[in-house]
Amino acid sequence: MEINGSSAKEVWLNTIKTILDGGEEYTDHNGRVCKELLNIEMVLPNPTENTVIEPINIITKNQEWVYPSKDELTSIMFKENQNPVYEHTYGGRIFKFGGVKNQLRDFVIPLLRNDNHSRQAVVSIFNPFKDSDLTNKNIPAMMYFQFRIKNDKVLMTAHFRSNDILIGWPANIYQLFKVQEYVAKELQLNMGSLTTISNSAHIFLDNGDAINNLPLDK
């Protein structure tokens, strides 16, 4: 199922409403009741800094707990060294996968400079040497993301095995936007669409107050 919108806020709210209206309700392995839809594609045709931050602003306004700052969210994607606060951070896997590989600088950017029709510009987040472990209960939610160039614009698509649309997606879309922006600047191109594909797009129903405070009818 594809969900479009003119802004991250519109796409986000439309997706939440779609899950609440038609999602399957079940209790997950942590004992939390959620509603879920499979393989949801959320598309932002023209992402900008001002529009991708709107879902975070709404969540921050309606929650008592503190959402990570924009700087912290960005650092999770760009810092090579592991932040001890988190089980894993994406930056280490993007810029120093396996302790050695900068997937953007050493692969994606030079690849697209040399071949703007390439379908190979993929950044892997999932690491089977660490994550394919039956005792590991906290593997990354994002599996990989890919870049394409169309009409002199950099398009980005990210695939998630699991995505908390209410709380997690606002951070995810901002973080992905910053990476897309970085690649576009390196290639001296404009930015195109930003898409997330979530195998499990879900909402935890114990976040009832946050759900009720959303402008879902606007």
Image (cartoon, rainbow, N blue to C red):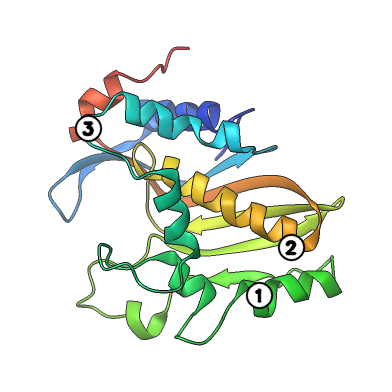
The residue depicted at 58 percent of the width and 78 percent of the height is 102
Tell me which label, 2 or 1, sits earlier in the chain: 1
The residue depicted at 43 percent of the width and 12 percent of the height is 217
For label 3, count other residues whose C-alpha is less than 10 Å away and answer few (under 14), some (14-19) or many (20+).
few
Residue 13 position within the rendered picture, expressed as x and y whole percent measured from the top left: 46, 27
Question: What residue sits right under mark 1 in the picture?
Answer: 105
Callout in the foreground (2, 3): 2
Q: Which mark is residue 186?
A: 2
Callout in the foreground (3, 1): 1
For label 1, count other residues whose C-alpha is less than 10 Å away and answer few (under 14), some (14-19) or many (20+).
some
Q: Are marks 2 and 3 in contact (CB under 8 Å)?
A: no
Question: What residue sits right under mark 3 in the picture?
Answer: 207
The residue depicted at 44 percent of the width and 49 percent of the height is 71
Q: What is the three-letter code of the residue carrying label 3?
A: Asn
Q: Is residue 111 left or right of residue 3?
A: right
Residue 126: name its quadrant. Answer: bottom left
- What's the CA distance linking mark 2 and mark 1? 9 Å
